[in-house]
Image (cartoon, grey):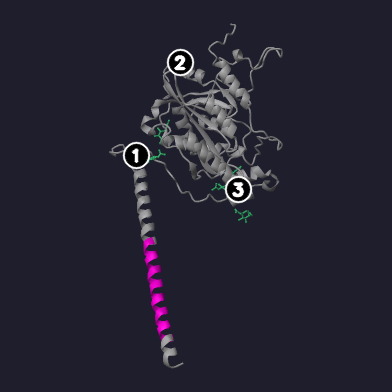
């Protein structure tokens, strides 16, 4: 090519070169901005971490108001040696799963409530913290509890606070849907702790340990706790009255009371919901414990249990595990006649089984349907309620 055509081409080429140079400059520029941004993020995170590190230092002038701790735990890996345990392959899938992940104790928090108790310092103002095990899908259960016995309020001069503790359910879209449901509820009620682990029966111990760890961090001085299921009728007014009547215990000494179960051991029949094979626990006995439907404990005892749990291998049955932690600390549960986990005995089938007079003095009864829960709470609080005896 010669003449104007060649000149034209050269011109074009040089234009292209300029264009390419600009492109490179632009890209380098973008990269620089990105790196700077990441670096800034890093610095900020380090600052947050520093804040966390000095959290316990009482000399620190400005205690952080709300310290939402977002640990980025690396995903806990399967323990493949567990598959070498004799008889592993013949165990039910949920037990296999339990053995493979038994050692995992830390999971990312999806929903946190760092200010639930007004911060660690002020948490002594929480007299009764209701800690309710709830599966993500059980929206109606949570709703009725918010309206009835778990309503946050001052009763008889002291604060009652509520927390639902939850994992995740389902997979794929369903898991996402259920987690966004909890997120929406959280926006409205601020009463959910959620961690990213599968919310299954055999993971309940994990749920309890994660809660106790949260409590140690965010609510260490709460006086008492009710720890229980979402399908119990808990007469929280009566609980406050009972706890206030305790002499020499303002939450700072041992209390662990409910429906005591003792002289039992692991159920060895594979068909049972609570099957615990020898591969999970060798010993044929369990220490005394309170049925997990609902029990009351002091903040002190919660702290003891958490400390003991650090060195006790997880057993999938959560209420038994609590008993193990108590036993290791040389403590035990006590029986409270007001906690009726096997239901309430109504003397005649001709009587209304849900007559409020049978329920007005209980602490806790297992188990209630959702409409019954609403009905009973209203009925036992009817100012015109008249009962004989
Ligand atoms: C934490 O504190 C910041 C600033 O003090 C506030 O904007 C934010 O809403 C607080 N978060 C919660 C969860 O209370
Ligand atoms: C399981 O046992 C086999 C045979 O004893 C051994 O070779 C293998 O390393 C073990 N696997 C693990 C993960 O411990
Ligand atoms: C893995 O499982 C084996 C067999 O049960 C056990 O001996 C080992 O302690 C487990 N490892 C961890 C990290 O828990
Ligand atoms: C407990 O949760 C973890 C994390 O989601 C999961 O890997 C494990 O399978 C669960 N265990 C049981 C017994 O469901
Ligand atoms: C639990 O352990 C922590 C840290 O070691 C300690 O500060 C606390 O007093 C212990 N709690 C009880 C009730 O012993």
Task: State the image quarter where residue 199 is shown.
Answer: top right
Mark 3 or mark 2: which comes first in sequence?
Answer: 3
- Residue 241 position, x and y percent, is 48, 17
Instruction: Say left or right for 275 vs 226.
Output: right
Q: Residues within 10 Å of mark 3 (few under 14, many from 20)?
A: few
Please say if 72 is above or below 259. Answer: below
Mark 3 or mark 1: which comes first in sequence?
Answer: 1
Q: Where are the magenta residues, as a range?
A: 9-33
Where does label 1 land, which residue? 64
Q: Residue at x 54, y 43 (%)?
A: 180
Closest to the camera, between mark 3 and mark 1, is 3
Q: Main secondary structure of the magenta part?
A: helix
Secondary structure beneath dot 1 equals: loop
Closest to the camera, between mark 2 and mark 1, is 1
Where does label 3 land, which residue? 173
Secondary structure beneath dot 3 equals: helix
Mark 2 or mark 1: which comes first in sequence?
Answer: 1
């Amino acid at each position: 090519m010669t003449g104007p055509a060649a000149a034209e081409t050269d011109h074009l080429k040089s234009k292209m070169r300029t264009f390419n140079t600009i492109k490179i400059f632009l890209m380098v520029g973008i990269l620089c901005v990105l790196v700077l941004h990441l670096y800034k993020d890093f610095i900020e995170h380090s600052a947050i971490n520093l804040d966390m590190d000095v959290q316990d230092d009482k000399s620190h002038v400005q205690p952080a108001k709300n310290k939402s701790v977002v640990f980025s735990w690396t995903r806990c890996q399967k323990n493949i040696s567990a598959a070498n345990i004799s008889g592993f392959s013949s165990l039910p899938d949920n037990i296999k799963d339990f053995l493979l992940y038994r050692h995992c104790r830390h999971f990312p928090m999806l929903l946190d409530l760092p200010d639930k108790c007004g911060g660690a310092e002020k948490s002594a103002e929480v007299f009764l913290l209701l800690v309710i095990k709830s599966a993500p899908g059980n929206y109606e259960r949570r709703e009725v509890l918010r309206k009835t016995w778990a309503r946050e309020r001052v009763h008889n001069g002291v604060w009652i606070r509520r927390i639902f503790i939850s994992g995740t359910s389902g997979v794929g879209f369903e898991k996402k849907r259920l987690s966004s449901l909890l997120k929406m509820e959280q926006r409205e009620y601020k009463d959910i702790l959620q961690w990213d682990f599968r919310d299954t029966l055999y993971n309940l111990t994990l749920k309890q340990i994660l809660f106790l760890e949260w409590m140690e961090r965010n609510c260490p001085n709460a006086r008492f706790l009710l720890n229980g299921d979402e399908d119990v009728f808990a007469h929280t007014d009566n609980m406050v009255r009972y706890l206030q009547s305790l002499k020499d215990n303002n939450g700072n000494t041992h209390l662990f009371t409910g429906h005591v179960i003792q002289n039992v051991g692991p159920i060895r029949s594979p068909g049972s919901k609570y099957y615990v094979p020898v591969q999970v626990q060798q010993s044929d006995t369990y220490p005394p414990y309170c049925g997990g439907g609902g029990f009351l404990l002091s903040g002190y005892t919660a702290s003891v249990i958490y400390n003991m749990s650090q060195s006790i291998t997880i057993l999938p049955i959560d209420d038994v595990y609590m008993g193990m932690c108590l036993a290791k600390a040389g403590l035990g549960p006590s029986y409270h006649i007001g906690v009726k986990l096997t239901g309430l005995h109504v003397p005649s089938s001709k009587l209304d089984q849900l007559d409020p007079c049978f329920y007005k003095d209980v602490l806790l009864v297992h188990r209630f349907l959702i409409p019954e829960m609403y009905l009973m709470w209203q009925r036992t609080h009817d100012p015109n309620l008249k009962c004989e005896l």
